[in-house]
Each structure stands twice: as structure tokens, then as C-alpha cells.
Image (cartoon, helix red, strand yellow):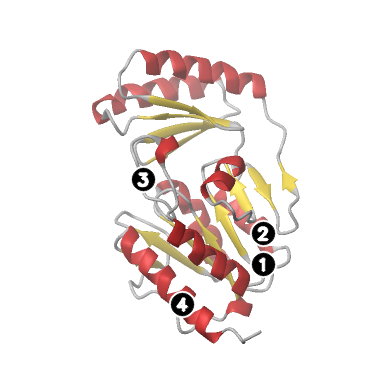
Amino acid sequence: MTETLPRDSLHPAKTAFFFDCDGTLAAIVDQPDAARVETEIVEFVRILHEATDGALAVVSGRSIAQLDVMLAPLVLPAAGVHGVERRDGAGTIYRPEFDAAAVLQIAARLDEFATQHEGLVSEVKSASVAIHYRMCPELEGEALSLMTDIASQYPEFRLLRGKMVAELSASHRNKGDALEDFMREAPFAGRLPIFVGDDVTDEDGFVAVRKLNGIGIKIGAGTTSATHRVGTLHDFHDWLRQLSQTWTAAAPAL
């Protein structure tokens, strides 16, 4: 693994970008609804999206609808809910069938649990339900015990662990599946894939990009399958800034 991120060796016509959102484009905050992508970062993403002729996708645990709000006015290729839903480069959205009634049943149990413990936040996405305990880390064991119990009752759901969050997904698709789907299609196919993420849920993406002989960039500490590592979110945003400035300067005048 190297901590020197590629930049000068990259070419817009030969590169495909895949970015996680929380912890990668946006800073992680206590309340999920309060997270935002700074205007400057949205602009860097826009520059790279245009420079690569659209070969840039956001691959996130958030839903596509949430990503559109956070990245407005951009409407990008995206994979939401850890790869369960996907919008391709042409704007077509793919969602597998899932048990929506079970999602609501699980959500009701998590809502009841959250109301009994100050600081817990339950969240319902299009095809998953999560419990956040960032504001009360002492409840991690209790929260994980509940989620494990629910998972045993709904074997079709997949239990995911993240940074101070546990999530039950109605599909076994993951971020790596979504990344591989993108790489079979225009404008991504035939390019060098670069995937950037910060959490354990991004490891599926790092494994997939390694299989494709691409570059995985892990933000922060922790065991990882990524080929590269950057220390902090600020360091990654600085790399985005430098790359976008380089490619803007190299763009032909109209």
C-alpha cells in the first residue's frame, strides 16, 4: 500500500471515479440529516465529472434521493443503499425487488428502541433501516445485540456495520457489485477505476476495484483491501482540489 496518491499519471479520458459520500465527500456528523457536501467539494466533483465525460459516480450507503439533495445541483450516476439501487450514466434507475413490508416492520422496532434511549437515531432508506449511536457510544453493545436479533428473524436481510452505525439491508448487493455494473457500461468501461471510501462498508468496493486492476483509496486508519491510503478527509479534499485545478488548466479553450 502507498500513501502517495496518483495525480500526474491520471488522464481524464482514461479514468473513472467512484466516491463514497459520508466520510469521503462529506464530513461525518452526529445527526445524519445534518451532513452536507461543501459547495467547494461539489464544484471539484463537477469538474471531474465533466473532464471525464461523465465517468464519475457516487457509491454510498445513502439513497440516491438523499445523494441528489446533498450534491445539488449535480445529478450524477449513483449507487445508493450500499449498491442496492443504481442510476447509470444514461439516468436509468435499477432497483431489485425487496420486502418493503419487512423494512417497515424493522423500522417500527428500531423507532421504538430509539425512543427509549436518548441520542439514538433510527433511519429508514429505500431498502434498508439503520440505527446510529454516535451520540451515545455506550449503547453500541445493546444496539448491535438488537440488530443481530432482528437479522436472525429476517434472513433475507444483510447486517452491515459502519462507523457508529448498524444497518439491515433488504438486499445482498454491495458497493462492489454496483461498481462492477458501472464498469461494464459507457462511459466507465475501459477506463482505470478509482474508488475512494473511508468505512468498512467500502471494503467491497476496494475488493472489486482491485479485481479490475484499479486503485482503491482508503481515508483514515484501519485494515483495508485498498491499494492506497490517505490520512484524513482534509488530505483527500486537498487531492481533489489539486486534481480539479490541474485538469481545469489543461482543458482546451472554447
Can residue 67 be seen in the rendering of this structure?
A: yes
Between 122 and 173, the one lying in front of the other is 122
Q: Residue at x 44, y 36 (%)?
A: 33
- Give the image location of residue 35, x and y in percent: 41, 43
Residue 188, label in figure: 1
In front here: 125 or 160? 125
Q: Hey, which quadrant is residue 49 in on the image?
A: bottom right
The tag earlier along the polypeptide, 3 or 4, is 3
Please give the residue where the numbered disc 2 appears in the rendered image: 182
Is 175 situated above or below 141?
below
Disc 4 to disc 2: CB gap under 8 Å: no
Q: CA distance from mark 3 to mark 2?
A: 26 Å
Quarter occupied by residue 233: bottom left
The type of residue carrying mark 1 is Phe
Amino acid type at mark 3? Ile
Badge nearest the viewer, 3 or 2: 3
Q: Amino acid at mark 4?
A: Gln
Side (left or right) of 88 relative to 208: right
Query: Taking the image as drawn, is residue 82 in sight?
Result: no
Image disc number at residue 28: 3
Residue 129, compared with residue 191, is above or below; it is above
Q: Is residue 30 left or right of residue 107?
A: left
Element under label 4? helix
Whether tag 2 and tag 1 are in contact, CB under 8 A, the answer is yes
Q: Pointer 3: residues within 10 angstroms few (<14), some, or many (20+)?
A: some
* Label 1 secondary element: loop
The CA distance from mark 1 to mark 4 is 22 Å
Find numbered disc 2 in the image and state the secondary structure of the residue it sits on.
helix
